[in-house]
Image (cartoon, helix red, strand yellow):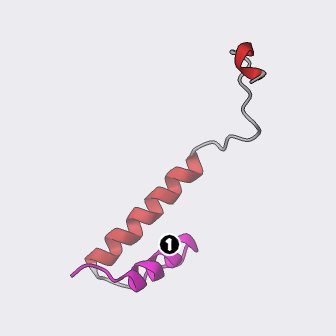
Amino acid sequence: MPLSSYRMHRIYLAATMNYGLGSDNPEELAYYNKIRKEMDEMEKEPVKKGIPLNWDFPDRMNK
């Protein structure tokens, strides 16, 4: 049986707030682990800050 949107939201909150799930349901555990994995990958990626400037095309700057 697929997870309800309410249950998915509760699992998402638990995963993002770094709480334990407290369930042995394999579907819920899989969804929880998926979110935790995505969060861990996001933490490893560098954050690009600032405004990207493109100085390679001076003819397009004045348009």
Q: In the image shown, does 17 or 10 lie closer to the viewer?
A: 10
Percent position of residue 35, x then y: 44, 65
What residue is rendered at 78% in x and 21% in y?
Answer: 62
Most distant residue in the front direction: 63
Q: Is 39 in the magenta?
A: no
What residue is rendered at 26% in x and 76% in y?
Answer: 26
SS for dot 1: helix
Residue 21, compared with residue 49, is above or below; it is below
Q: Which residues are magenta?
A: 1-22
Residue hosting label 1: 15
Q: In the image shown, does 3 or 20 lie closer to the viewer?
A: 3
- Figure disc tally: 1
Most distant residue in the left direction: 1
Percent position of residue 3, x then y: 31, 80
The quarter of the image holding the C terminus is: top right
Residue 34, compared with residue 32, is above or below; it is above
5 to the left or right of 52: left
7 to the left or right of 15: left
Q: Is 9 in the magenta?
A: yes
Residue 30, compared with residue 60, is above or below; it is below
Q: In the image shown, does 44 or 59 lie closer to the viewer?
A: 59
What residue is rendered at 48% in x and 79% in y?
Answer: 20
The quarter of the image holding the N terminus is: bottom left
What residue is rendered at 71% in x and 23% in y?
Answer: 54
Tell me the kind of residue under disc 1.
Ala
26 to the left or right of 14: left
47 to the left or right of 62: left
Q: Quadrant of residue 50?
A: top right
Q: Quadrant of residue 18?
A: bottom right
Number of other residues with Cα within 10 Å of mark 1, as a class: few under 14, some 14 to 19, many 20 or more:
many
Percent position of residue 27, x then y: 28, 75
